[in-house]
Image (spheres, rainbow, N blue to C red):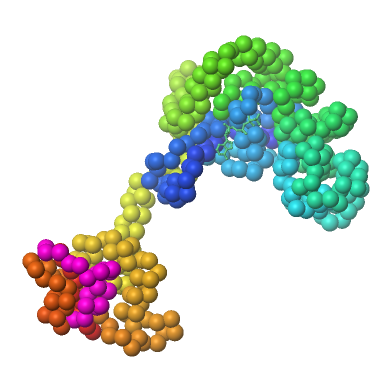
Amino acid sequence: MVENKVTVAANHVTKRFDLAERQSDKVKAVFKFWGKGIPNFWAVKGVSFEAHAGETIGVIGTNGSGKSTLLEMVAGLTQPTSGQMTINGSTSIIAIGAGMRPKLTGRANIRLKALMQGMTEKEIEAKMDDIIEFSELGDFIDQPVKSYSSGMKSKLGFAISVYSDADIVIIDEALSVGDPTFTQKSMERTKRFKEGGKTIFFVSHSAAQMRQMADRVIWMHYGDIRMDGPIDEVMPEYERFLKHFNRFSENERLAYQKRYKEAQKTFTLGHLKQLERNRQMLLDPSTALKRQKENEQFFTEGSEKMGWFTRIFLLVITILTVGLMNKQLLNMSWANVAAHPTHLITNFAPSKLAQLNQRHGRTGSNERAETPVYSATQNTYTVKDGETLAGIAEKANISIEAIMQANQMTDQVVNPGQEIILPVER
Ligand SMILES: Nc1ncnc2c1ncn2[C@@H]1O[C@H](COP(=O)(O)OP(=O)(O)OP(=O)(O)O)[C@@H](O)[C@H]1O
């Protein structure tokens, strides 16, 4: 039976955002396998549900509870951090301005979105007039979308989706900004989707719209599913919560939100795994271990999947590469590479590299440089009391410039006890 077909299956799905504000934090985020230092925020904390063909599922929750993040994962616009989101069919999301190119006209956006949803040019041409008529945008269809009001964007998005024939339609608050006549017309159309066996996810803060549209409701609460069930069971509970929440004083409300948001920052996949283990034990202790093993994959994220062996292997490769570059570029011995591992970095400024290239006889035009070539296969020399750079240069029969170049010195000051490189002319 069509109605029993599972179209969406979410299995312990999470979504983590990095709260990295500064650029340096973002650079650190690239090296995630080091793992620490970037504050996390878990917008979705391990949700599981199944949706079927012919179901209209309302998604409710206070602001920031994770509704849009969850549905963006259903639409495939963003990937879960961990867990599994299985989508069985094509998807279409209608959110205010979602997927619209603001600089293109309404008509061009229709064409683009329809192409992305797999329609052929011929199909688009055949449906174009109907889509424009449904959108009620009239002459504005040839104006850039950036000039549209949010209601107009929503009308355009809705009109495109009505004709896209996707199996899973996600309506994320798109009906909250249109005028009542358009909203009513769109709701009627959505009901027809349902009759056609599509799965509809419907987000709205309007209890009346929810009651008119949905037969089942998922209540999102700070990244968790607080309730999932028939509308007659979930809506009264949600309304009771809202009534209670709205009676809070400003301070009580802030404290409540802070407590939950804090839990979203300190959440870990280990914690989720433990909760699931406990749940399995309560359900059936005899199969709990088996289930635990089957579910293991859902509690690791991409970067965590990198085992310790891989991490150590990568570390060794990185050290060897930097060492080899030091040796080749700076002509250092392995002993010197070990003694000055950061030498390459301090030499890496473009001007320094140019100096090095010159030192190695490499010029931009691949010609050999005329200037003497010094090798940093050095003698190191310890500056004695009262010695000057000029005196050392004279004794060693090397120019002051060559010594300064080999040691990246910006002035001629040397101090007793300081180790300097005396380069050898090749
Ligand atoms: N790119 C992002 N980076 C950091 N945090 C984000 C990002 N996107 C969303 N969030 C946070 O994730 C949480 C969930 O956001 P989401 O938009 O999914 O909530 P919502 O339930 O749809 O809210 P609303 O009803 O206001 O639309 C919020 O606390 C939000 O601040």
Compared with 106, 58 (above or below) is: above
Give ligand 1's quarter of the image: top right
Q: Position of residue 421 (x, y in %)?
A: 19, 71
Residue 64 seen in the current view? yes
Is 372 situated above or below 274? Answer: below
Does residue 124 appear left or right of residue 55 in this picture? right
Q: Quadrant of residue 221?
A: top right
Can residue 55 be seen here? The reply is no
- The magenta segment is 398-417
| Residue at the image position 49 percent from the left and 43 percent from the top | 21
Q: Residue at x 48, y 17 (%)?
A: 282
Question: Does the magenta portion include 351?
Answer: no
Quadrant in the picture for the N terminus: top right
- Give coordinates of residue 179: x percent, y percent: 85, 31
Q: Is residue 227 above or below residue 355?
A: above
Look at the image and say whether residue 403 sits in the magenta stretch: yes
- Residue 340: % across, % down: 23, 62
Give the prevailing secondary structure in the magenta stretch: loop
Tally of numbered discs = 0
Measuring from the top left, give residue 134's x and y in whole percent. 89, 40
Name the residue: 80% across, 22% down: 212
Identity of the residue furthest to the left in this view: 385
Tell whether 25 sits left or right of 193.
Answer: left
Q: Residue at x 80, y 43 (%)?
A: 148
Q: Quadrant of the C terminus?
A: bottom left
